[in-house]
Image (tube, rainbow, N blue to C red):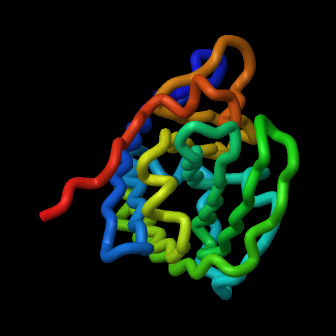
């Protein structure tokens, strides 16, 4: 849902997490709406880059169980990505340079956009027992931004706030 203080316009957003094997997680974001109203840059060379959140960006937060530590992944429509570890709320930040990521953006006409991000990280099994936060920043062509999350804290948008870690996945079942 869009943050109450930002205009989400005619957009809707869905997300889905799928685990592959032990340490691979697929994070899928599907955006529906008038895409010509958004800043959606063309695909570029996939590489790590900081400050992706300054424009349209899809984000995944996973919190370690029984801890204040959490991980953040950012995925840009360009195919660029970033990954960080935090000791606590917005503190002790460390870039994670060794996560492997593949980003697959796909645009269907002017109404459907999908971004699939595949993350390979040895912490995935532990992180999936904790809480998850899924969020998106949409930069509109008029210069405004809308902030999307499963849940929002009071006040300004803050995806690092514990209220945004609204879902507990629990331990994965064994098939």
Measuring 58% from the left and 47% from the top, which residue is drawn there?
64
Left/right of residue 14 with respect to residue 52 in the rendered view: left
Q: Residue furthest front?
A: 66
- How many labels were placed on the picture? 0
Q: Is residue 15 left or right of residue 121?
A: left
Residue 81: x and y in percent read: 66, 70
Say which of 63 and 107 sits in front: 63
| Residue at 80 percent of width and 66 percent of height | 95
Residue 84 in which image quadrant:
bottom right
On the image, the x and y values in percent for residue 116 come to 42, 68
Residue 1 picture location, percent across and down: 46, 28
Q: Nearer the viewer, residue 12 or 104?
A: 104
Looking at the image, can residue 60 be seen? yes
Looking at the image, which residue is at 62% across and 64% down? 76
| Left or right, residue 115 beside residue 54 | left
Point 76% across, 50% down: residue: 86
Location of residue 25 with respect to 54 vertically, above or below: below
Which residue is more in the foreground, 53 or 42?
A: 53
154 vs 145, nearest the viewer:
154
User: On screen, 94 above or below 131?
Assistant: below
């Amino acid at each position: 849902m869009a943050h109450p203080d930002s205009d989400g316009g005619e957009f809707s957003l869905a997300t889905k997490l799928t685990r592959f094997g032990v340490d691979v997680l697929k994070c899928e974001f599907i955006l529906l709406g008038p895409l010509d109203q958004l800043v959606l840059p063309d695909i570029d060379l996939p590489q790590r880059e900081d400050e992706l959140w300054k424009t349209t960006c899809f984000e995944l937060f996973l919190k370690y169980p029984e801890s204040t530590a959490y991980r953040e992944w950012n995925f840009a429509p360009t195919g660029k990505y970033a990954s960080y570890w935090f000791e606590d709320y917005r503190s002790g930040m460390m870039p994670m340079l060794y996560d492997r990521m593949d980003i697959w953006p796909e645009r269907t006409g002017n109404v459907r956009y999908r971004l699939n991000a595949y993350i390979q990280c040895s912490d995935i099994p532990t992180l999936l027992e904790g809480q998850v936060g899924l969020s998106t920043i949409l930069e509109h062509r008029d210069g405004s931004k809308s902030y999307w999350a499963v849940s929002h804290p009071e006040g300004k948008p803050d995806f690092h706030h514990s209220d945004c870690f609204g879902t507990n996945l629990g331990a994965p079942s064994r098939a």
